[in-house]
Amino acid sequence: MSGTTRARPRKSLGQHWLTDRDALRRIAAAADFRPADTVIEVGPGTGLLTQLLAQRATNLIAVEVDHALAEQLRRRYAETPGVTVIEADVLETPVEEILNAGRGGLPYVVAGNLPYMIGTAIVRKFLRAAVRPRWLVVTLQLEVAERMTAVPGRMSYLSAETQLFAEARILFRLPPGAFQPPPKVRSAVVRLDVRDSPDVEVDDVDAFLSLVQAGFAAPRKRLRNSLAIGLRLPAAIAERILAVAGVDPALRPAALSLEDWRKVYFAHRRRGREGAE
């Protein structure tokens, strides 16, 4: 999503290139990586952010899916030590393969102006990777950024999933005019500091997230009903699970914290074990 005046953004790739120089400088400043860090830039486009990152990075790997843009960047940085450009779909390429292609090692960090259509999927990929980054500083649609950083009372499944793996905060917001072409939505730059371990202790992270997702099956309904719908259980049983967890069944799912969901998860697991017996 970075851009110059020569290339034309492709709608099929969701390209809205960030061209506001002040915003680019703020992103580069927020990317406070250490000399030992490998920096993975996702979606460099025509390289305005790449240029700023390359001034400080000792090992920068730019991952660009657009063939023409990748070739342009390769030519530009052919003589620049420590900068590697790979043409690849970041969602289809294992993190280890990206690091190896750029001769990158650990630890690593992620920066980039992410395409709106796949921004959430890209964040999820790195947060769930076997080898995770220290942090991500990325541009996302404002609505997505607000959901990722929401507090109890405004939580969603995305909030819970993101915050299980990272401390998330919005650094600053961006108007449509900061991009070419201007998108129809506002954007925000988000920093996600990846946790060494999930924020709540559970015995099976995937099963825990499945339970949370079930709890948000009908987010506008009371928790008792939403959980019943998601788990395909009678509402009375869902209410008993919540009673064991000590969570008010009249709450909306958005009101729960990760710790609340942990209690619901173990109450549900306990019921499953008792039923099996």
Image: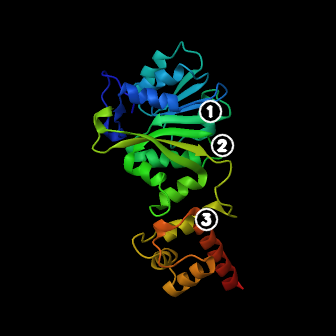
SS category of the residue bearing label 3: helix
Q: Nearer the viewer, mark 3 or mark 1?
A: 3
SS category of the residue bearing label 1: helix
Residue 45 seen by the camera: no
Residue 1 in percent (x, y) is at 39, 33
Q: Are marks 3 and 1 in contact (CB under 8 Å)?
A: no
SS category of the residue bearing label 2: loop
- Up-down relation of residue 94 to residue 242 (above or below): above
User: Relative to the observer, which residue lies in front, 65 or 1?
Assistant: 1
For this view, does 213 lie left or right of residue 16? Answer: right
- Neighbor class of circle 2 (other Cα within 10 Å; few <14, some 14-19, many 20+) is some
Q: Gap in Å between the C-alphas at discs 3 and 2?
A: 25 Å
User: Relative to the observer, which residue lies in front, 134 or 94?
Assistant: 134
Q: Nearer the viewer, mark 3 or mark 2?
A: 3
Q: Which residue is mark 3?
A: 259
Q: Residue at x 42, y 20 (%)?
A: 72
Q: Residue furthest top?
A: 79
Q: Gap in Å between the C-alphas at discs 3 and 1?
A: 35 Å
Q: Which residue is mark 1?
A: 99
Q: Residue at x 55, y 14 (%)?
A: 80
Q: Which residue is mark 2?
A: 131
Q: Are marks 1 and 2 in contact (CB under 8 Å)?
A: yes
Residue 108 in percent (x, y) is at 63, 34
Say what amino acid the circle numbered 1 marks.
Answer: Leu
Q: Are marks 3 and 2 in contact (CB under 8 Å)?
A: no
